[in-house]
Amino acid sequence: MAEQAASIEALLEEGRTFPPSPEFAQQANINDPNVYEEAERDFEGFWSRFADELSWFRKWDTVLEWDPPHAKWFVGAKTNVSYNCVDRHLATRRNKAAIVWEGEPGDWKVYTYWDLYREVCQFANVMKGLGVTKGDRVTIYLPMVPELPIAMLACARIGAAHSVIFGGFSPDSIRDRIEDSQSKLLITADGGFRRGNIVPLKRNCDEAIAGDTTIEQVVVVRRTGHADELMQGGRDQWWHDLMQGASQKCEPEPMDAEDMLYMLYTSGTTGKPKGIVHTTAGYMVGTYATAKWIFDLKEDDVYWCTADIGWVTGHSYIVYGPLSNGATTVMYEGSPDFPDRDRWWSIIEKYGCTICYTAPTAIRTCMRWGEEYPERHDLSSLRLLGSVGEPINPEAWVWYRKNIGGDRVPVVDTWWQTETGMILIAPLPGITTLKPGSATRPFPGVLADVVDEAGNSVGLGAGGYLVIKRPWPAMLRTIYGDPERFVEQYWSRYPNIYFTADGSKRDADGDFWLLGRVDDVINVSGHRISTMEVESALVDHPTVAESASIGKNHEIKGQAVVSFVTLKEGIDGTDDLLNELKRHVATKIGSMARPDDIFFTAELPKTRSGKIMRRLLRDVAEGRALGDTTTLADPGVVEALKEQYGDEE
Ligand code: PRX
């Protein structure tokens, strides 16, 4: 964090700023700077005005009930999120493209709102036929195919909560998440395409639900056509077979404002992932409002978020935010470099995308590949760019604006989390002066601050912990099945204040500069990984006695996993074993958690009370001078490590 702060310091001195162009400001959905003050004066009224733009079976009695740390939004209201994302648009946008989908092999398909309505209704009826009822949980493990948002919206329609698992997760991770959510139904595909290869999704599911499981039925989308022999009679059925007989009408279930919409697992500071719970009305209003104002969504926009729907970004800003706005949302199944490194830019040109929302790690990768790839394509349709998932370094921000945005479009850096459900800190592109590397300021109505250990505001120009001091509509309501952990994790450090576990700094203008996580969570290419998860995967291997993992700064990925491993007595730390351990972590968790480096060590540096000093391991991994070692039980341990590995960097 110290070096990041230093580089930000340097940047602030440089002071590049980008005020909105008069043309952009003039056409923007919101261009009146007074909106911030107005929202401050009455934040409940502010949110309820967005809610008024949506459809309700019954309106709320109270906007907010705040019994810290428990919030209820739009209390007493009845609505349905699938109705708001689909049916609401049938009168005015029936034939408008809702989802534009492109598969990795180059196949593509457009769903109008009317198409989407029929498919969602049909699949909702399929699930009802399979015995899914309101309040059930449904696990979805699909590639980026249209059936994924269709299944999510169908769940929302009948009141079942979805639990989407990213397609990169391993069978063990799927098993843990199914067990925790107690899902009865699993929706998957035979496989998905990735860089020309087939990801064996069905095989992973079969492994995950072998033996004891709550899963009774599996619906399988045929995508790659290679796994017909894996269909298990009595348990597995094809999506297309089930859809054939299903009615195209399904009344949306009137859901209570606080009924669960979905859960999504994310990594925390322990080895056990947390099922973050989002509910109906507040989440819908929050994603609707932020998509409308931050992405400035217009009727003619073709909006593309490159994330995978398996992460929260895809939930909020591929599916719920854009569709509740009646926008056209683009989905792409595969990898950015297949068949060549210009694939993304070819998609922008082909569909005339006007907005593109992606992650810094992807931008840095494109920077490394070089300008020649975007130069092959006409990207002039773009009018706004977005970034999310990790701190964006100013160089990447400027490159993105120049080479993708033609040096003319705004770049909105958006800060948020799985837990926050919606963007909380980001520019409003018709109002805010942009600064490369800063997410600028909280969305109107959101009260964010940077505080010290004691919870005091650090004031402008200083750094500390980012906290949110007032409830917001899409906030998480709990951790599924673990209400104590919810309180402990987010609300116990400061009374009645949400602790984000991010470091941040505010500049003299009050703008926020995010500095990364302050807990044992690392952010690899925008994917959240807990060091504890990696450690438990490592000690699960029969040769490993003890391990400690850290995040090391990485030019492209932001951070990379580095693990220090103590082997059991008599085991040799060979290169073969090293590779085997890397593979083991990928198999246990998923390939995104695979350590870049593993260092064998006779001992780990610990304090006298036995706590592993990860800070020192970071110093070793990054080849820095060692920080304070006075609290170490045995200072020799870390010196030996440094001697052994310190020169490698
Ligand atoms: O550290 C912050 C970082 O990503 C974390 C949240 O990760 P996740 O729940 O997976 O959600 C990612 C997408 C919303 C945060 O605690 N993060 C996210 N966006 C930014 C960011 N860090 C800096 N700048 C951002 N714009």
Image (cartoon, rainbow, N blue to C red):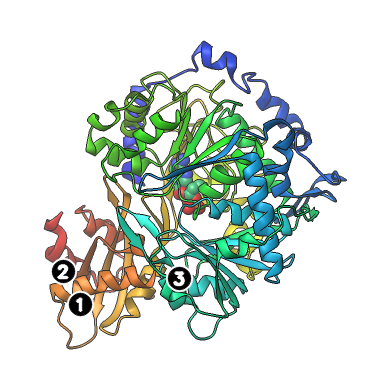
Identify the amino acid type marked 2: Ala
Q: Answer yes or no: do the residues labelled 2 and 1 have beta carbons within 8 Å?
A: yes
At mark 1, the secondary structure is loop
Closer to us: mark 2 or mark 1?
A: 1
Categorize mark 1 by other alpha carbons within 10 Å: few (<14), some (14-19), many (20+).
some
Disc 1: residue Cβ within 8 A of ligand 1's nearest atom: no
Disc 2: residue Cβ within 8 A of ligand 1's nearest atom: no
Give residue 130's quadrant in the image: bottom right
Residue 384: mark in rendering: none
Q: Identify which residue, 154 or 116, lies in the foreground.
A: 116
CA distance for labels 3 and 1: 30 Å
Q: Name the residue under label 2.
A: 640
Q: Which of marks 3 and 1 is nearer the N terminus?
A: 3
Q: Mark 3 points at which residue?
A: 173
Q: Residue at x 65, y 18 (%)?
A: 32
Does 254 appear above or below 483?
Answer: above
Q: Name the residue under label 1.
A: 602
At mark 3, the secondary structure is helix
Identify the amino acid type marked 3: Ser
- In this view, the residue farthest toward the front is 245
Residue 496 visible in the snapshot: no
Identify the amino acid type marked 1: Ala
- In this view, the residue farthest toward the top is 22
Q: Which of marks 2 and 1 is nearer the N terminus?
A: 1
Measured from the top left, where is residue 288 in percent x and y?
65, 38
